[in-house]
Amino acid sequence: MLHELAKDVFELFYPNNCGLCKKAITKGEEHICTSCLLSLAETNFHTIKDNAVEKILRGRFNFHRATSLYYFNKEGGMQEAMHSIKYLNNIYLAEHFGKLMSKKLKDWLQDVDHIIPIPLAQKKESQRGYNQAFHMAKGLSDASGIALNNTMVARIKDTATQTKMNRAQRIENMQDAFQWNTIDKLKGKHLLLLDDVITTGATVESCVLALPNNIDIKISILSLAVAIES
Ligand SMILES: [Zn+2]
């Protein structure tokens, strides 16, 4: 209900405009204009073995593979895109990025069974009215046909905003933040955890470490953007 309302509010202010530059979009464009889309720096990490995202996460928990579609740089358009999907109710753009992930990461996604958006802290989700990771996951699921599972993991602790924290503080902040439900159903499956941005990896780490030890589940990690130098 709330996210439908958020959509309506967005449409009211920006009907058929680019989610980044706010200029009118033209025929063939969807939610982002061609010049803004081209301004986003793609990592191409899905083609690189032991890529920079995998290096961030390696040794902290077991995973199958990890990648991010774009770089999150201070100067690039991704800053604007992230602002739009997080704070301006631009659910359309979040879903559109999900569709782009499906298109650009087709082979990389091949054996994934379930897409699981990382849940937001409850307080944050009720303030915002939606979880942007859910809408990216929805776009990805709609375009790829891979099942979306939004009930398997819950956020059980309202964590503080991590913007100004270092890696150690973020890990401490995220401790015991997640709880998995009836995980037995997912035995033998390959789960893709999806988040908007990876900075230190503390959030995905906490989410994966909340799984029971030695459970037969394959985990891969995908984020729209990663905050490292391009
Ligand atoms: Zn634009």
Image (cartoon, rainbow, N blue to C red):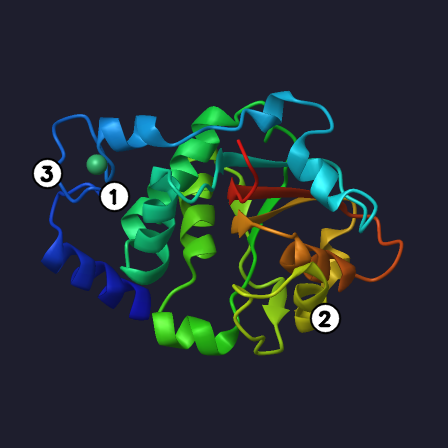
Taking the spot 51% from the left edge, 66% from the top edge, the residue there is 120
In space, the residues marked 1 and 2 are separated at their CA atoms by 34 Å
Pick the residue in front: 144 or 75.
Answer: 75
Task: Please report contact status of discs 1 and 3: CB closer than 8 Å, yes or no.
Answer: no
In screen coordinates, is 7 left or right of 203?
left
| Mark nearer the viewer, 1 or 3 | 1
Label 1 amino acid?
A: Leu
In space, the residues marked 1 and 3 are separated at their CA atoms by 11 Å
**Residue 193 placement (x, y as % from top left):** 61, 49
Label 3 amino acid?
A: Ala
Disc 3: which residue? 24
**Residue 12 placement (x, y as % from top left):** 11, 59
| Residue 177 visible in rendering | no
Mark with earlier residue (1, 2): 1
Residue 87 higher or lower than 40, as above or below: below
| Mark nearer the viewer, 3 or 2 | 2
Dot 1 falls on a residue whose secondary structure is loop
User: Any mark on residue 172, and which?
Assistant: 2
Label 2 amino acid?
A: Glu
